[in-house]
Amino acid sequence: MDPGASSPEKQEKGNLVGIHSKRLGVCGWILFVLSLLLVIITFPVSIWMCLKIIKEYERAVVFRLGRIQANKAKGPGLILVLPCIDVFVKVDLRTVTCNIPPQEILTRDSVTTQVDGVVYYRIHSAVSAVANVNDVHQATFLLAQTTLRNVLGTQTLSQILAGREEIAHSIQTILDDATELWGIRVARVEIKDVRIPVQLQRSMAAEAEATREARAKVLAAEGEMNASKSLKSASMVLAESPVALQLRYLQTLTTVAAEKNSTIVFPLPMNILEGIGGISYNDHKKAPSRA
């Protein structure tokens, strides 16, 4: 690895608390010995003041003469805090819910909208959360608001409404990278609500209704076209066999009679009578001539 390329990383690590030397110096060791003697002299009363209980979901960052004791926070369980020289800060490691209030945003297509969201994050490094930022929760809250406005300002209204998951993932990535030095790990970002003006809602509703009507007309036209093709094929089949047309006609009459009990008068073609009685109209015309 190039030493010049790694120098910014080393400089950045040097700015983090817990990386530099932990030497107390001569005065520090003297005060440490005096504090320890005070604990021994006032024992066993002092032991109740020096022992602190840290819960399972908490960690303690101990400052001794203003210096952090270790790169890693102490706990859970019992920890020893020496009087006069030690100060400790408790840090909660549970997931925190950060509600982002509605932010008025001007989208890329010049539409004013209000968007609110929620951020779920937790502290994974208690030392960085205490030493590298004054108020880690307030800083994360303000950064979440700013990031939400910046990201949504580059999107159109249709992209915001259709791509909430992608936008939330982008916001989560930006927040996670920005809060890494604060000991924060962003678990999830959700966009709760997108509020648009009433007039724009009416315009979008009218546009959607017009689109649905146009789609319905197209589907109806396609259905008519398919039906006409089917009827054309059926007519070609019936044209090849006239008897099939008569059978279809009788089947239709049966269907109508089954739905409603009524008297149906329909013309009976002569060719059907010819098939039933074995007589024809020509035979009737020939009989008188023979007589």
Image (spheres, helix red, strand yellow):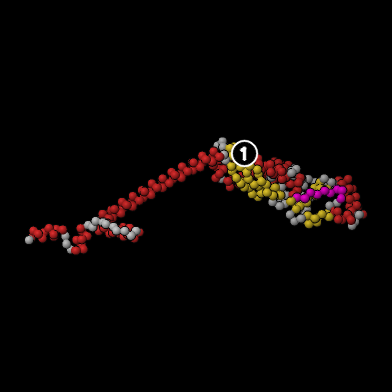
If the image is split into quadrants, where does the C terminus sit?
A: bottom left
Q: Element at badge 1? A: strand
Q: Residues within 10 Å of mark 1 (few under 14, many from 20)?
A: some
Q: Is residue 260 above or below residue 196?
A: below
Range of residues picked out in magenta:
83-91
Report the predominant secondary structure element of the magenta stretch: strand
Q: Residue furthest front?
A: 262
Nearer to the camera, 47 or 202: 202
Identify the residue at image location x=73%, y=49%.
125
- Could you tell me residue 273's position as x and y percent? 20, 61
Nearer to the camera, 291 or 141: 291
Q: Which residue is mark 1?
A: 104
Q: Please, what is the three-letter code of the amino acid marked with disc 1?
A: Glu
Q: Is residue 164 visible?
A: yes
Q: Is 234 positioned to the left or the right of 205 in the image?
A: left
Nearer to the camera, 266 or 10: 266
Q: Is 96 positioned to the left or the right of 271 in the image?
A: right
Q: Is 30 positioned to the left or the right of 144 in the image?
A: right
Would you identify the image quadrant in which residue 116 lies? top right
